[in-house]
């Protein structure tokens, strides 16, 4: 049975957030490693070249803005430097008015009650 103790709720929330972050990192590592093997280490927009020393500044951009669309041939990816990647997402938001392409059929809202949980802590 779940406890109403704010400390228990906070610990449970911390575990949920940590697990979500771990899952995201694992997913990113998979397609990032694939993309780095498939493509030359060059930004697809500005042409900046990367080496092992600065490779952390080269990101994988999803052309359709769907981070779950990761075909093994890399057809939905392009390598962009941090700056070009940020610019691409800012342009997408400006053009479409939405943060990212989302599957509107999803009904699960894992953080729906987060505001009320945090409000209780004040």
Image: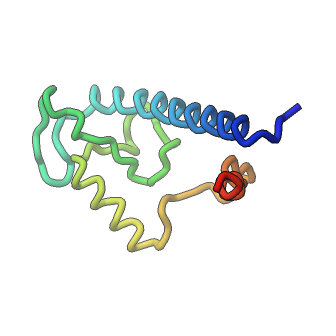
Residue nearer the viewer, 21 or 74:
21
Residue 51, quarter of the rendered image:
top left
Rendered location of residue 3, percent (x, y) = 83, 36
Query: With 101 as the anchor, is 122 left or right in this view?
Result: right
Q: Quadrant of the C terminus?
A: bottom right
Residue 115, quarter of the rendered image:
bottom right
In the depicted structure, whether residue 67 falls above or below residue 2? below
Q: What is the image's colouring?
A: rainbow
Rendered location of residue 67, percent (x, y) = 48, 45
Rendered location of residue 52, percent (x, y) = 15, 26
User: Looking at the image, how many numbered discs can be counted on the residues?
Assistant: 0
Residue nearer the viewer, 9 or 79:
9
Please identify the residue farthest to the front as the structure is shown.
Answer: 122
Please identify the residue farthest to the right as the structure is shown.
Answer: 1
In the depicted structure, whether residue 24 falls above or below residue 64? above
Identify the residue shown where x is 41% and y is 68%: 93
Rendered location of residue 82, percent (x, y) = 24, 48
Query: With 56 as the anchor, is 6 left or right in this view?
Result: right
Identify the residue shown where x is 13% and y is 28%: 53
Residue nearer the viewer, 35 or 99:
99
Q: Is residue 105 visible?
A: no
In the depicted structure, whether residue 120 falls above or below residue 25? below
Q: Is residue 49 visible?
A: yes
Identify the residue shown where x is 65% and y is 34%: 11
């Amino acid at each position: 049975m779940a406890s109403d103790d704010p400390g228990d709720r906070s610990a449970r929330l911390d575990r949920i957030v940590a697990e979500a972050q771990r899952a995201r990192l694992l997913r990113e590592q998979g397609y990032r490693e694939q993309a780095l093997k498939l493509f030359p280490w060059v930004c697809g927009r500005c042409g900046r070249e990367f080496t092992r020393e600065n490779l952390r500044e080269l990101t994988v951009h999803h052309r359709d803005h769907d981070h779950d669309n990761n075909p093994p041939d890399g057809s939905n990816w392009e390598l962009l430097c941090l700056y070009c990647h940020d610019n691409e997402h800012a342009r997408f938001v400006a053009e479409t008015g939405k943060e990212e392409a989302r599957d509107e059929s999803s009904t699960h809202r894992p953080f729906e009650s987060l505001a009320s949980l945090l409000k209780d802590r004040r």
